[in-house]
Image: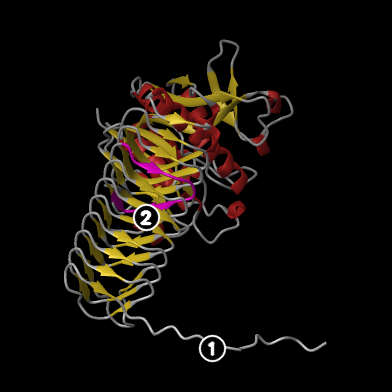
Amino acid sequence: MNLSVIVLAAGKGSRMRSKLPKVLHDLAGRPLLKFVTRAAQSLNPHMTVVVYGHGGESVREALADETLEWVEQAEQLGTGHAVEHAMPGIADEDSVLVLYGDVPLIESATLQAMCEPVSSSVMSLLTTRLDNPHGYGRIVRDADDKVLRIVEQKDASEAEQQIDEINTGILAANAKALRGWLAELENNNAQGEFYLTDIIALAVRDKVEIETFAPASIEEVQGVNDRAQLATLERHYQLSEAQRLMREGLGLRDPARFDLRGELSFGSDVVIDVNAVIEGTVTLGDGVTIGPSCVIRNCNIADGVEIQANCVLEDATIGEQSRIGPFARLRPEAHLADHTHIGNFVEIKKSVIGSGSKVNHLSYVGDTTIGSRVNIGAGTITCNYDGAYKHRTIIGDDVFVGSDSQLVAPVEIGAGATIGAGSTITRDTPPGELSLTRSKQKIVSGWKRPKKEK
């Protein structure tokens, strides 16, 4: 029996007060909807159908890298109406799992357990109990504890509103049976909508057994309706990820002040200080230390690297035993060899820094190839942009560039050369020689500094 998954993602999410469709709001750097589709894909379904509406093509474009079927629900007439829209391409013999694009933390193990017993005579329903169930559909059971129906909050009697077992909306059923129940739905309720929950009573009528399951944690089934709920799930997710990584050996100074917005792999004895943000795909070698308040995105960082406080690193490669920061920025295509030093208020962009080279203070190096054992003095910049085109600077091995120098590209500094402090270099310099451009110092005797009149 094949499994087909339907993900409902057509709602506007007006309580988010945003032009962005609700399911595209980020949690840990990914759209809410992507969490759900990845959970669905982990079950190896025959197909995953996403029902979209508000936001139209922007929703499809955000998940263009995934293999999904898309169905538009132009008019939102309820969850039953949405599921009915997704059914035409699903075979009668399939099992159908219904998920929600704004319930991002549902676990694959929970879904797998739900799907296993489904047949023409058994359907599965995910429920949980809340201390305050207000706003949720209640699970109404008979004296033998069997599910009879689901009643929505607005349609519930006073007695039914005291029930603490609620419907999460997630269910699994045989496709043929589900198709028949959907055709019978009516919208004579407080909302004037076709409720998917009404199929429970129809299943009971048809003597289909309803087996209920509970999630491992309440956060699995919590939806996002406003920004406060989104922030709550963000913190839960981040803390759970921090706990997982620490169990795998990562050292975190404070797991409550750590954000993972991508994938992190790491060696032994890695320590990360507070307020670090890890984005994209990041690899940390053995013995890496990351100081407080750093942002690291899509980087490969080798063994023994020290990243000091307040650094921003993006799409960079850093060799062994290097030191970065504090307050350094590595922009895309920065490639640093072993034993390099990049210091405070230094920016590196699209450049190769050779082994043992240092750019320690207040410098900009862009579109540059630097050899080994080079020292770049404080305040040095490579002038790589002429207003229309980018040009490259090449600096040979063992070069010393004095402070406050400008290297105007395209230019090549020969191996072993020295650039005098305060120079503007516009032509290639020979290897092993001193090059400088400096006006002659003049002393004006008897000069008086201006003073304000009393």
> For the residue labelled by badge 2, is the local secondary structure a helix, a strand or a loop?
helix
Apparent side of residue 157 relative to residue 432 in the rendered image (left or right) = right
Q: Which residue is mark 1?
A: 444
Residue type for callout 1: Val
The label nearer to you, 2 versus 1, is: 1
The residue under label 2 is which amino acid type?
Ala
Q: What is the x, y in percent for residue 260?
A: 43, 40
Q: Which residue is located at x 55 percent, y 30 percent? A: 167
Quarter-of-image position of residue 363: bottom left
List the single residue furthest toward the top: 144
Q: Which residues are magenta?
A: 304-317
Q: Which residue is mark 2?
A: 62
Q: Is residue 310 magenta?
A: yes
Residue toward you, 333 or 231 = 333
Q: Nearer the viewer, residue 123 or 41?
A: 41
Residue at the spot 67% in from the left edge and 39% down from the top edge: 154
